[in-house]
Image: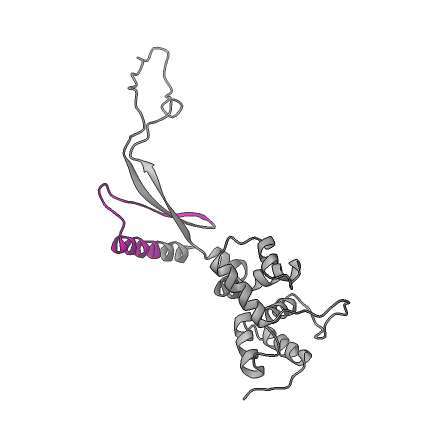
Amino acid sequence: MSIESATKCEIRAVIRYLVAKEKSPHEIFNEVRTVYGEGHMNRTSIYKWCREFKNGRMNVPDDLRSGRPSILTDDIVNKVENAVRDDRRLTLDELSAMFPQLSRSLLHETITETCKPPEFLERYELDGDNFLKSIVTGDETCVAHYTPETKRQSEQWRHTTSPSTKKFKTTISAKKIMASVFWDHKGIILIEYLRQGETINAARYCETLKKLRRTVHNKRRVC
């Protein structure tokens, strides 16, 4: 059953109630759409009110302001989102030319609210910095197979009568190997070296990810 006639204040009161129940913005958006349909409040507005109530706003009515009412509709929001997804290098100037009916500030707000991965936003809304601390990321790089000691690293304490040591001239190895490095907010978690002659494929990478999972589990269980 959907409610066809509803004021914006009524919907904002519902949003405030759901925020108090610690519902995520995505869940609130779905519930509002289910009950009130698509014509009452667009996603950007719902996310904005979720943020304001979460930040401590108490009153439900709009703040008094002058100027024309917002012309932002779901259709325009979808068009902006699709344009950015088709070309993520679009600048704000280029988007302003594509959507002249929107002010730059409203266009910027629309992009930031709609073009981010919602699952990350929802997790951050719920867990805050604890969610960011749980993130593990990684990268690959080529490293030299052998790196000689520097002159300073090879220095030794010697007596004046000690025989001099002979140091052979060494250079960085021309051979390189692939290293996969994974880390979180505390530092390096795992470094996985690819054996000489081995290539990265799906099976090999799955093994690395399984090893990473065990390492993360063991380290965080100890902490």
Residue furthest to the left in view is 197
The residue lying at 74 percent from left, 70 percent from top is: 63
User: Quarter holding the C terminus?
Assistant: bottom left
In the picture shown, does residue 156 fall above or below 133? Answer: above
Where does the image place residue 12, in percent across and percent down from the top left?
A: 65, 76
Residue 194 image point, x, y percent: 27, 44
Q: Quadrant of the N terminus?
A: bottom right
Q: Residue at x 28, y 31 (%)?
A: 174
Q: In this picture, is 211 found above or below 20?
A: above
Query: Which quarter of the figure has residue 151?
Result: top left
Any magenta on residue 205?
yes
Display coloring:
one colour
Q: Give the side of residue 61 with respect to residue 179, left or right.
A: right
Which residue in the rendered view is the most extreme toward the bottom? 1
Front position in the image: 25 or 222: 25
84 or 44, which is in the foreground? 84
Q: Residue at x 59, y 68 (%)?
A: 44
The image quadrant that residue 48 belongs to is bottom right
How many tags in the picture? 0
**Front residue of 210 and 70:** 70
Q: Is residue 207 above or below residue 141?
A: below
Looking at the image, residue 97 sits to the left or right of residue 183; the answer is right
- Is 174 a magenta residue? no
Q: Nearer the viewer, residue 185 or 59?
A: 59
Residue 165 position in % (x across, y down): 30, 16
Magenta stretch, residue numbers: 186-215
From this viewpoint, is residue 125 visible? no
**Percent x, y for residue 73?**
61, 71
Q: Is residue 149 visible?
A: yes
Q: Residue at x 71, y 70 (%)?
A: 69
